[in-house]
Amino acid sequence: MPVTIARPRSLRGEIIAPGDKSVSHRAIMFNALSNTGTASITNFSPGGDCTATIEIMRELGVEITRNADPNGRGDSLTVKGVGLNGLQEPSEILDAGNSGTTTRLMSGILAGRDILTILTGDDSLKSRPMGRVVNPLTEMGAVISGRAGNTLAPLVFHGGSLRGSTYEMPVASAQLKSCLLLAGLRADGITTLTQPAESRDHTERMFSAMGVNLKTSGLDLVLEPSELNTVDVEIPGDISSAAFWMVAGICHPDAELMIRNVGINPTRAGIITALQMMGANLTLIDERVVAGEPVADVLVKTSQLNGIELSGDIVPLLIDEIPVITVAAAIAEGETVIRDAEELRVKESDRIHTSITWLNGAGIDAVGTDDGMIIPGGGSIGGGQFQSSNDHRLAMSLGIAGLISIDPITIVDPDEAGSSYPDFWKIIQKIGGLIE
Ligand code: S3P
């Protein structure tokens, strides 16, 4: 059912960020491979992507229980580790749904095993590049086939035996990095990766907590084959979900929003730097460390925003937040230029194309470039009816645009938000957004 969002007179309230999607995937996968017992995971991401990871691990013989938290904070899970070599051959094709993280990390787990597995997903996922994981895994000795010359899902993992490798990563991708580190755990020999730039480091942090012998030096990573020890994980709130409320709070003309329990790991917090560069009235409160990850509450208020340039090393640190940054850029004074962000072309949608399409439809004169966008700023967002293009972050960016646009915005397919944030529309209503 479509939803229509209209700008409320004021925007006030307190929101608790849902459990982080990236950390949730890793907490399940890594504990499933541990050989030391049962882990408990709290504040697990409510999104469909992480549920896909649970279902796949269950198909592979891992026992996982999932219960709603009595305090309403995420779900609590237990995962019983089967050890690095304990996964069983599934009778069904494994379905990763919309989740690129599930597909690429599971590729590192499934490669080079003595079981046959087939991994697929929805139409968006089947169009996303998988050669970036298939090629280096093949170099490590895995035998993998897929559509379009082994570059698109469904992917079939036949077996093989893995050897360590030295690999220069062509993209700053935490999914690729994590895939190869997971494969390296069971390889014969050392795996060495060089990254072109920093990307989210949740795998490195969790591996260290689980006793893996992984050394980081600048952009280089050196992993020795290791077993994993179970670790309990309290998942921090998802900064990528919190980003929507940050942008709503700074853009609405009469707003004050408190967002609680936001993970601010420096490899994820590019959005905070970018919004502060834009002049956002954004304060971090009660900075603390939860399960090895830095966390804070974030207070945002109505702000006078200016355009900025985003390029270079900051881009991987805010890659998922660019769709919602375009909302702030549209109304900021002065031009915003985004470069070096060609990865946007291969996310859940081509986010350069889909962002520019809706911005233009809402009267914002933005243009796409090969590797980014130019948004002139100083505009007012008009209303209209828009599609999410099978992309949760597009759906939610449109919702935030509706909170500040002159006329209402209708999102034809709002349920896409469920991949990472099923409660998103309820929260819009709770903080004063008007939904029809
Ligand atoms: C993720 C890494 C990012 C991000 C995705 C989640 C992860 O992808 O866009 O939403 O959990 O590792 P890339 O690493 O491919 O850029």
Image (spheres, rainbow, N blue to C red):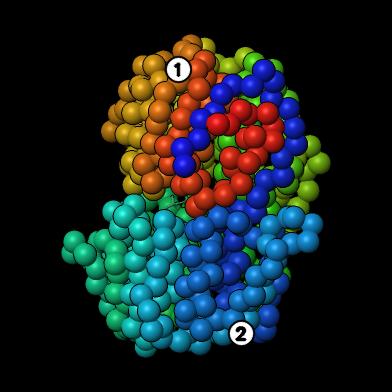
Whether 262 is drawn above or below 248: the answer is: below
- Can you give x and y, in whole percent of width and height, for residue 291 in the image? 73, 60
Q: Residue at x 79, y 57 (%)?
A: 71
> Which residue was labeled with disc 2?
35
> Neighbour class for label 2 at 10 Å: few (<14), some, many (≥20)?
some
Is residue 213 found left or right of 377 in the rendered image? right
> Neighbour class for label 1 at 10 Å: few (<14), some, many (≥20)?
some
Is residue 372 found left or right of 263 in the rendered image? left
Residue 55 visible in image: yes
Q: Residue at x 32, y 34 (%)?
A: 353
- Can you give x and y, in whole percent of width and height, for residue 127 in the image? 28, 53
> Which residue was labeled with disc 1?
382
Q: Residue at x 71, y 40 (%)?
A: 15
The image quarter in which residue 383 lies: top left
Q: Which amino acid lies under the numbered mark 2 shown in the image of this protein?
A: Asn
Residue 134 visible in image: no
- Can you give x and y, in whole percent of width and height, for residue 430 in the image? 69, 36
- Under tag 2, what secondary structure? loop
Is residue 418 found left or right of 168 in the rendered image? right
Total tally of numbered discs in the picture: 2
Whether 64 is drawn above or below 202: the answer is: below
Tell me if the residue at label 2 has its CB under 8 Å from ligand 1: no
Specify which label sits upstream in the sequence, 2 or 1.
Answer: 2
Is residue 326 found left or right of 73 in the rendered image? left
Q: Which amino acid lies under the numbered mark 1 shown in the image of this protein?
A: Gly
CA separation in Å, label 2 and label 1: 55 Å
Q: Residue at x 61, y 57 (%)?
A: 45
Q: Which residue is nearer to you in this view: 92 or 155?
A: 92
